[in-house]
């Protein structure tokens, strides 16, 4: 007996035709996961202790994202190993956009040059979603140092030699930039690493060290009180919280080491659908442009720079060789 061919419902036929047309045109159709995203709570893993700038930013953004997505955004502080423990947890999480890292440039960029072994490969196991903020820092000196500008400081250290500079740890930008200044000026600067900014700044105020790089958040009160002196800021634009302090680049210090800046960014596990990554990035751009969020970012000494994944990847590739060179010339190695 001849059976009639099953008929395809009109709507299904339209879907099939639309899909065929899209594929022929090279258009990428949203995956089922992307269409239903987010389907539950989102977890922000902050690989640093609660209360720090990265944690504060994550909570600020998480609150806004929760409202927009109508899903809880949970903050999990998973600190240790220079941010690698928490970042590794994200790298090994399901690539569904529900587990994300909010982290510093250290765990995404510089650690790969500092550590002999890492539990993850940041360029293979993670996808960059959005650079949330740029985090320039301020070059400060003890008031007794008789200079006012970056170029004057370079001449001073070259002539005086054996001056001391502080950092908040081996392999940190203050260490790497100070070492670079020492090498380029043949100044034999002495590096004094500290466990955090607070003790570093106290020794700078006391005159035990003569120079340091510090976050605006930690340095501003001491600058306002005249206990330390600002020479310039890193990065390519002035800080909103220190508007009268020129960048080192403005002062004629063209070396890219002084114009590079760290960042706080969002990353997801590799293989997270592109549609999910793009949707997250769009939300980050919208949230960081909100006046109440932007003002909080400025007050922390950061610059809002929420970006597309492509822009984040471009800046990452641009800065990567600079950081690699800084680490290699310092000889810093961590276990």
Image (tube, rainbow, N blue to C red):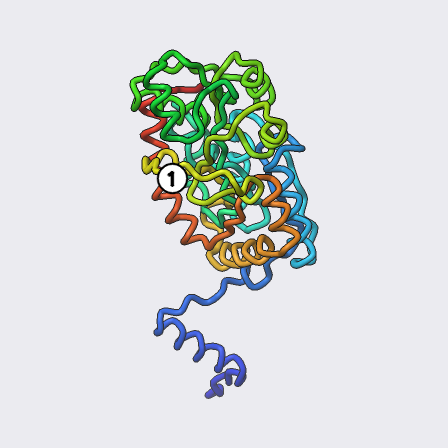
- Residue 256 drawn at (x, y percent): 34, 37
The answer to whether 118 appears left or right of 240 in the picture is: left
Q: Is residue 109 above or below residue 3?
A: above
Quadrant occupied by the C terminus: top left
Q: Is residue 110 above or below residue 271?
A: above
Mark 1 crowdedness (10 Å alpha carbons): few <14, some 14-19, many ≥20: many
Residue displayed at 48% across by 17% down = 210
The answer to whether 93 appears left or right of 50 in the picture is: left
Nearest the viewer among 335 and 124 is 335
Residue displayed at 60% across by 55% down = 287
- Residue 306 drawn at (x, y percent): 51, 51
Residue displayed at 56% across by 15% down = 203
Nearest the viewer among 17 and 75 is 75
Q: Is residue 143 above or below residue 224?
A: above
Residue 321: tell me if it is visible.
Answer: no
Number of numbered discs on residues: 1
Residue displayed at 49% across by 78% down = 15
Which residue does the numbered mark 1 point to in the structure image? 249
Q: Secondary structure at mark 1?
A: loop
Nearest the viewer among 30 and 193 is 193
Quadrant position of residue 235: top left
The answer to whether 221 appears left or right of 175 in the picture is: right
- Residue 246 drawn at (x, y percent): 46, 39
């Amino acid at each position: 007996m001849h059976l009639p061919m099953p008929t395809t419902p009109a709507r299904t036929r339209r879907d099939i035709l639309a899909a065929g047309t899209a594929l022929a045109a090279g258009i990428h159709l949203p995956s089922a996961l992307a269409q239903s995203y987010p389907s539950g709570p989102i977890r922000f893993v902050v690989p640093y202790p609660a209360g720090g700038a990265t944690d504060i930013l994550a909570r600020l953004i998480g609150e806004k994202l929760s409202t927009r997505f109508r899903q809880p955004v949970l903050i999990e502080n998973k600190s240790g190993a220079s941010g690698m423990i928490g970042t590794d947890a994200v790298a090994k999480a399901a690539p569904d956009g529900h587990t994300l890292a909010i982290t510093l440039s250290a765990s995404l960029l510089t650690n790969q040059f500092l550590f002999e072994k890492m539990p993850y490969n940041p360029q293979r196991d993670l996808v960059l979603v959005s650079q949330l903020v740029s985090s320039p820092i301020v070059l400060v000196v003890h008031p007794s140092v008789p200079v006012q500008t970056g170029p004057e400081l370079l001449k001073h250290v070259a002539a005086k030699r054996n001056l001391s500079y502080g950092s908040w740890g081996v392999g940190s930008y203050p260490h790497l930039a100070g070492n670079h200044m020492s090498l380029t000026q043949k100044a034999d600067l002495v590096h004094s690493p500290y466990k955090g900014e607070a003790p570093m700044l106290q020794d700078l105020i006391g005159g035990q060290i003569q120079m340091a790089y510090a976050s605006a958040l930690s340095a501003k009160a001491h600058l306002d009180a005249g206990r330390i002196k600002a020479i310039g800021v890193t990065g390519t634009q002035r800080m909103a919280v220190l508007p009268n302090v020129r960048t080192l680049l403005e002062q004629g210090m063209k070396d890219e080491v002084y114009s590079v800046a760290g960042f706080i960014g969002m990353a997801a596990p590799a293989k997270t659908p592109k549609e999910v990554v793009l949707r997250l990035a769009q939300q980050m751009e919208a949230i960081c442009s909100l006046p109440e969020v932007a003002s909080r970012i400025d007050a922390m000494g950061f610059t809002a720079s929420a970006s597309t994944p492509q822009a984040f990847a471009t800046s990452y590739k641009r800065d990567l060789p600079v950081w690699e060179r800084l680490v290699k010339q310092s000889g810093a190695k961590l276990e």
